[in-house]
């Protein structure tokens, strides 16, 4: 594996770093000020649209999508350092570049499994940043960490499917620009193969019976910039059978294809969050004095900063290796590495952010610094896209299997 950036990656890195300095970081405070004046907290501040227009003008658009017909055509290894940079401002930068979840995963699903009509109707406006989307899988009544547990029914009725179920923590669903849901449910709940019971189907937001009930909080945050995380009820929602994504019974396989890139994208951005935390720690340490000397000269603070630097360098190497393997041997071949980064990265970044909060004292838990919200986002990723324990179980099984 070559650890150097190729010419295209380096060019995009420099453009993106400049874009962050000139546009994104100054827009963070502006977005909060504008949001306070909006009629609805779920509306998008005007500055976000300005960022998107500028990013598109500079060619910093759809960088996540490796399919060159629809996206930038970057490999995972090329995209990794770019996603890391956007992680320094995770509530603005990914959206500005049209590289925010859950839209990224949904666009990948439509690119790989959607038919031409579905691509024309939903993929194209998503690629253009004209609409947003949601991915509806998690349910409150079952352990959704095991996707075979889901209970939402997708029942065939003539030329239609009828969807009945209750979902929650459906990211992006509160955003009024969210126009389409990709819903996972069971088309064959009694099927012998539990991984062929599920299917995915497209449900437009304005379909009768689709009820976005409420926003779910995340550690007390409503996550407005992400479009919220909603509880959604599907009460006999009827859509054409042509809205099925892929084939009936293919939902579990599509979910696995979707989650692999999603997991590594989260880990890439988490490293950027950790880098920003280290920067804030260092700035705080050299600007504050306690017990007669600067915090930067306190041994415990030096240990925190040194340990954080070592941890980030370790994580970055593991994530880059994983990206390289996804490019060279495919997502299945990189299965162990994807699980390893999903276990290690949120856990480590949460610890770094915790130290950064501690170093900032009361400021660390306040709205005056981004640390508390970054901590909540990182801690949530120990659950999202499969909790740590599920990945540990699977990874251990693969290791033990070598000796059985």
Image (cartoon, helix red, strand yellow):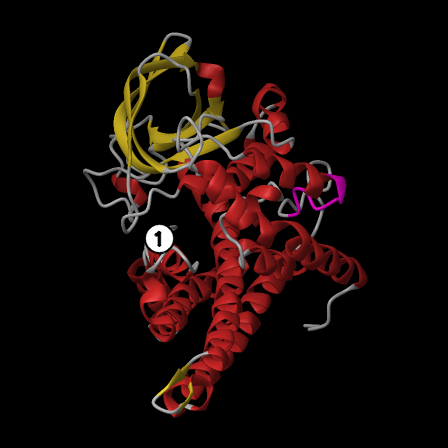
The residue under label 1 is: 386
Residue 60 vertical position relative to residue 207 in the rendered view, above or below: below
* Residue lying at 42% horizontally and 61% vertically, measured from the top left: 342
Q: Which span is picked out in magenta?
A: 57-63
Q: Secondary structure at mark 1?
A: loop
Badge 1 density bin: few <14, some 14–19, many ≥20, Cα 10 Å: some
Hey, which residue is sitting farthest front in the picture? Answer: 292
Q: Position of residue 67 (x, y in %)?
A: 68, 42
State how many labels appear.
Answer: 1
Residue 201: quarter of image: top left
Hey, which residue is sitting farthest left in the picture? Answer: 141
Q: Image quadrant for the N terminus?
A: bottom right
Residue 129 vs residue 374, the one in the foreground: 374
Q: Position of residue 211 (x, y in %)?
A: 30, 21
Residue 325 vs residue 359, the one in the foreground: 359
Is residue 117 visible in the rendered image? The answer is yes
Hey, which residue is sitting farthest top in the picture? Answer: 158
Residue 339: quarter of image: bottom left
Is residue 101 visible in the rendered image? The answer is no
Q: Image quadrant for the C terminus?
A: bottom left
* Residue lying at 61% horizontally and 26% vertically, measured from the top left: 125
Magenta residue check for 342: no
Q: Report the magenta stretch's main SS.
A: loop
């Amino acid at each position: 594996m070559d650890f150097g950036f190729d010419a295209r990656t380096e060019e995009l890195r420099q453009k993106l770093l400049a874009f962050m300095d000139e546009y994104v970081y100054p827009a963070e405070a502006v977005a909060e000020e504008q949001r306070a004046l909006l009629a609805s907290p779920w509306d998008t501040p005007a500055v976000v649209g300005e960022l998107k227009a500028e990013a598109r003008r500079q060619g910093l658009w759809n960088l996540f999508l490796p399919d060159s017909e629809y996206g930038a055509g970057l490999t995972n290894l090329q995209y990794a350092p770019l996603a890391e940079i956007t992680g320094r401002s995770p509530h603005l930068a990914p959206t500005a570049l049209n590289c925010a979840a859950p839209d990224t995963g949904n666009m990948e699903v439509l690119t790989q499994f959607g038919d031409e009509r579905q691509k024309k109707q939903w993929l194209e406006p998503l690629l253009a940043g004209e609409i947003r989307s949601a991915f509806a899988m998690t349910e409150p009544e079952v352990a959704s960490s095991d996707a075979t547990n889901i209970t939402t029914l997708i029942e065939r009725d003539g030329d239609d499917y009828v969807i009945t179920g209750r979902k929650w923590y459906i990211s992006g669903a509160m955003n009024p620009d969210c126009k389409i849901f990709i819903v996972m449910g069971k088309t064959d709940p009694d099927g012998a193969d539990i991984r062929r019971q599920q299917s995915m189907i497209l449900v437009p937001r304005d379909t009768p019976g689709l009820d976005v009930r409420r926003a779910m909080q995340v550690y007390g945050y409503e996550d407005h910039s992400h479009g919220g995380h909603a509880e959604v009820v599907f009460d006999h929602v009827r859509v054409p059978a042509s809205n099925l994504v892929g084939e009936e019974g293919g939902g579990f396989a599509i979910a696995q294809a979707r989650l692999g890139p999603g997991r590594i994208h989260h880990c890439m951005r988490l490293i950027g969050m950790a880098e920003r935390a280290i920067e804030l720690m260092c700035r705080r340490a050299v600007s504050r004095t306690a017990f007669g000397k600067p915090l930067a000269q306190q041994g415990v603070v030096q240990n925190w900063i040194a340990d954080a630097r070592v941890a980030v360098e370790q994580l970055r190497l593991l994530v880059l290796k994983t990206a390289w393997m996804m490019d060279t041997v495919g997502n299945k071949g990189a299965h162990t590495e994807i699980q390893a980064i999903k276990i290690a990265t949120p856990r480590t970044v949460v610890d770094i952010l915790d130290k950064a909060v501690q170093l900032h004292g009361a400021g660390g838990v306040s709205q005056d610094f981004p640390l508390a919200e970054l901590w909540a986002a990182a801690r949530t990723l120990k659950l999202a896209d499969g909790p740590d324990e599920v990945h540990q179980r699977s990874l251990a099984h693969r290791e033990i299997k070598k000796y059985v």
